[in-house]
Image (cartoon, rainbow, N blue to C red):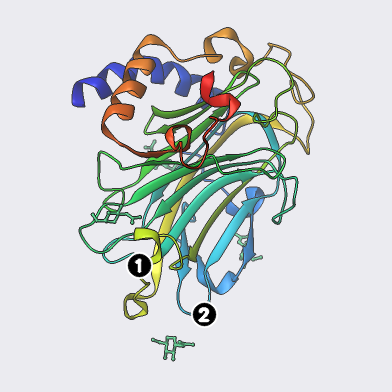
Amino acid sequence: MALRLASLVLLCSAISLLAIASAAPANASFSFNETFDVMWAEDHFKTSSDGQIWYLYLDNRSGCGFQTRQRYRFGWFSMKLKLVGGDSAGVVTAYYMCSDLGAAPTRDELDFEFLGNRTGQPYTLQTNVYKDGVGGREMRHTLWFDPTADFHSYSILWNTHQIVFFVDRVPIRVHKNNGGASSHFPDEKPMYMFSSIWNADDWATRGGLEKTDWGNAPFVSSYMDFQADGCRWEEPGPACAAATGEQWWDQSEAWGLTETQQEDLGWVGRNLVTYDYCKDTERFPEPPEECNL
Ligand SMILES: *[C@@H]1O[C@H](CO)[C@@H](O)[C@H](O)[C@H]1NC(C)=O
Ligand SMILES: *[C@@H]1O[C@H](CO)[C@@H](O)[C@H](O)[C@H]1NC(C)=O
Ligand SMILES: *[C@@H]1O[C@H](CO)[C@@H](O)[C@H](O)[C@H]1NC(C)=O
Ligand SMILES: *[C@@H]1O[C@H](CO)[C@@H](O)[C@H](O)[C@H]1NC(C)=O
């Protein structure tokens, strides 16, 4: 994997240069309050003394979550996360985009969900895509590193052609559009970015068999380095209303994966995927339309 990762650097630096060019300089101090609101349980939210790392706490009284004030439509969205270490069974840390503030019946959603585990057992990364309130498009991956030991970046590229989920710039999942109006591809509704931690011991770890051990509370997930290089819906700018081809994420280079990215995705597919709804013939005797793209 080291070689593969090295081979990614070239391409990725191209993307990150673009991403950084229009975002704030990496070292500029980031004001949490200008970009985010804490959604619930402010007493379960803390920042580092310089304000650059954001901690979400879960205990037996509450979890916690924050969201962007803006909605975005298309672009590159990235955050670094460090997950709850030790015994985190039952605990879910999430980082997702959603078109609504609640569980609206017609919401669009792009999810990263990290399912905790008993000490020494691997985390599961579950991704999902909702269009008009319909999800059920789960994929599950294990990771090639310990996500509790350090910060790693989790990113989404979103344009009218594809939605790509990245882990440390390695594409782990591609959700393709078929070009026309489709029932599986979220491309109309702008989305907020959310981050949260909550108790899900009814389903998260080994299907709900492993319960949260509250003796280990509080559980803490850490976030930093949010980047949103995309159209801001609340401050309309170029390319918000439609794909115009003016922004880098709208241009043909961003419509598909590069050859190296395809190789990396193949490697991930062969080695790290533990569940793919497209292959679940018990659940879907007819594979959903997007599975054939
Ligand atoms: C970030 O900015 C601070 C204060 O301006 C400066 O002291 C520090 O060296 C900078 N760090 C990096 C990595 O550029
Ligand atoms: C951000 O908002 C919170 C809650 O509204 C407040 O407690 C905090 O002091 C604010 N921080 C800054 C840096 O303004
Ligand atoms: C929550 O945890 C605290 C500290 O461990 C404990 O004192 C309290 O009884 C617990 N509350 C509930 C509702 O379980
Ligand atoms: C937790 O660890 C067990 C045993 O290795 C594994 O079967 C399971 O997939 C892991 N993850 C979750 C979320 O249950």
N-term mark: 1 or 2: 2
User: Looking at the rendered structure, which numbered label has been put on residue 61?
Assistant: 2
Give coordinates of residue 282: x percent, y percent.
Answer: 46, 41
Mark 1 sits on what residue? 209
Q: Quadrant of the N terminus?
A: top left
40 and 123: which is toward the camera: 123
| Disc 2 residue: CB within 8 Å of ligand 3 | yes
Three-letter code, disc 2: Arg
Q: Position of residue 174 (x, y in %)?
A: 49, 26
Disc 2, SS: loop
Query: Relative to 24, is 220 above or below?
Result: below
Residue 26 in view of the camera: no
In the image, what residue type sits under mark 1? Leu
Identify which residue is drawn at 31% across, 48% down: 147
Q: Kindly identify which numbered label has been placed on residue 270.
A: none
Please rate how many residues cluster around mark 2, counting C-alpha atoms within 10 Å: few if below 14, some from 14 to 19, many from 20.
few
Please identify the quadrant where the C terminus is shown.
Answer: top right
Q: Is mark 1 within 8 Å of ligand 4?
A: no
* Mark 1 surroundings: few (<14), some (14-19) or many (≥20) residues within 10 A: few
Q: Distance between the Cα atoms at labels 1 and 2? A: 21 Å
Residue at 53% of width from left, 74% of height from top?
62
Secondary element type, mark 1: loop
